[in-house]
Image: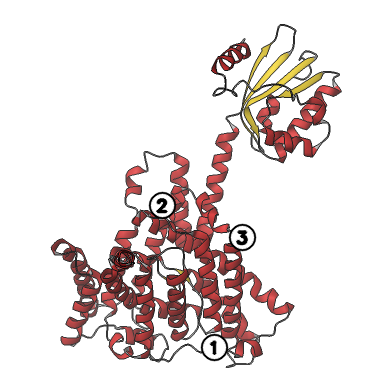
Amino acid sequence: MTEFIRKRTANAKNDILSGLTVALALVPEAVAFAFVAGVDPLVGLYAAFMIGLITAIFGGRPGMISGATGALAVVMVSLVAEGNAFGAEGENLGLYYLFATVILMGIIQMLAGVFKLGKFVRLIPHPVMMGFVNGLAIVIFLAQLKMFKDVNGDWFTGSQMWLMLGLVALTMGIMFGLPKLTKKLPEALIAILVVSAIAILGNFDVATVGSFIRDGGGEGLKGGLPQFQTDIFSKVPFNWQTIRFIGPYALILAAIGLIESLMTLNLVDELTDTRGNTNKECMAQGGANIITGLFGGMGGCAMIGQSLINIKGGGRGRLSGIVAALALLAFVLFASGLIEQVPIAALVGVMFMVVIGTFAWSSFRILNKIPVTDVIVLITVSALTVIFDLAIAVIAGVIISALVFSWENAKRIRARKRIREDGTKIYEIWGPLFFGSIIAFNEKFDVKNDPNQVEVDFVESRVSDHSAIEAIFNLVNKYEAEGKSIRLKHLSEDCKILLYKSSPKFREVIIEDIDDPRYHLAENPEAFTKGLSEYKL
């Protein structure tokens, strides 16, 4: 028991300090995404607290941070606007439709976990992962640039710009230099505290968390505990029209949330050399979104920037995410005045260091060492992440990779031809037989000029899909229409099952009582060698 407790608390200090740093970085992010979605800042902060806490406790990836994200916020904009149009001016129905959508989104995500769909993240190729990381780094960088603008959208000028740049540079300098002196202190948290102290004691006229909220139309961070939103059930009618309205939004939000969460989970796995549980994460994300919708949050998913801050700060366990969520709630309840004094420049500096750490700089070195198709996928995913959103980018990257894979495998179909002593022509098929290779497969046969006896040997091939079954079926019909006999042999058991299910005709042409020359090696090596030599003759 003592050993168990010791292992669990070994990294407690790093988890706590890293969690506090993440909580500070979460504030402007949650507020900014709430503004993007067109809702009150507290809606974003409550989402960050509830989703962060629930996924930290029950999620499949300790050390990963979840909360309100920009990828979801951009979809919510039109949802809130259309929802507001259903009611009278000032009724704010869009907010309640948002809560209902987030609840449905959570249900969809939990179903993905129940049906174990999280494992499909393994199908995402490495070039897509690199493109995702690079694109997201660019998105994070571009999001910070608006912090260099005033309330009218104009760039800072003169001393205001230089002061902002100086504090950002100081923050980055501390984060870069402190680990070289000691690794026992969390560089991001120290940098934020030092820069905040300098700005406050120097009475610098710089943008702060408080001014950022007020410029966006908010009243401040101060708030109470999240309240159960009973108005959802009275203001949002539970009928088919509502489902038709919120259903597509919920499906899109669920897909984006899961893709971003599972991609971030994979990235954290690589950074920590550990393995998370994708299906468990789907369940936790879904449950968290249901709860946050019921208690007035805007929904969310994993946050790559904050997750990287946590990992680089030494946060590895569930405690770091729990501390980040509880500290964020404490800021809202008790320390809003202090947090509002933190300069935006300090948080921008932290995020810039996250960008530098996130971007896969190695992708530049390998561009001339990997296949051209992988380069295209990497660049395409990066660009689409910046232009559209993560979901579109990843789906497009997977589709392109799948098409390239299919095309390359389609070219691998081969047929070696020989004539036996009795005049039977043998076609030995090599390579996968599927929708992409059936045209090349059909071109291998010369039905009109072949002898009356033909055998097709599938010892080095595999029937993969319905297109392949149809191709074989049509081939059999062509030979029989010419009055010729065709036999199929060395099909694997699963391939034979597929063919038998598709048509009883295959029971007449498939040779069952024949050994595969590759079998029985362990049982009888001499018989295998003899059989193989006879097969080659």
In primary-sequence order, the first of circles 1 and 3 is 3
CA distance for labels 1 and 3: 29 Å
Q: Is residue 355 above or below residue 221?
A: above
The residue carrying mark 3 is 115
In the rendered structure, the answer to whether residue 516 lies left or right of residue 66 reads: right
| Crowd class of label 3 (few under 14; some 14 to 19; many from 20; radius 10 Å) | few
**Residue type marked 2:** Met
- Residue at x 59%, y 12% (from the top left corner): 530
| Crowd class of label 1 (few under 14; some 14 to 19; many from 20; radius 10 Å) | few
Q: Nearer the viewer, mark 2 or mark 3?
A: 3
Q: Is residue 233 above or below residue 59?
A: below
Task: Kindly state the secondary structure of the residue where label 3 is placed.
Answer: loop
The residue carrying mark 1 is 228
Q: Which of the 4 quarters of the picture holds residue 8?
A: bottom left
**Residue type marked 3:** Phe
**Residue type marked 1:** Phe
In primary-sequence order, the first of circles 2 and 3 is 3
Residue 332 image position (x, y, % from top left): 37, 87
Q: Are marks 1 and 3 in contact (CB under 8 Å)?
A: no
The residue carrying mark 2 is 130
What is the residue that sits farthest to the front in this orientation?
A: 1
CA distance for labels 1 and 2: 41 Å
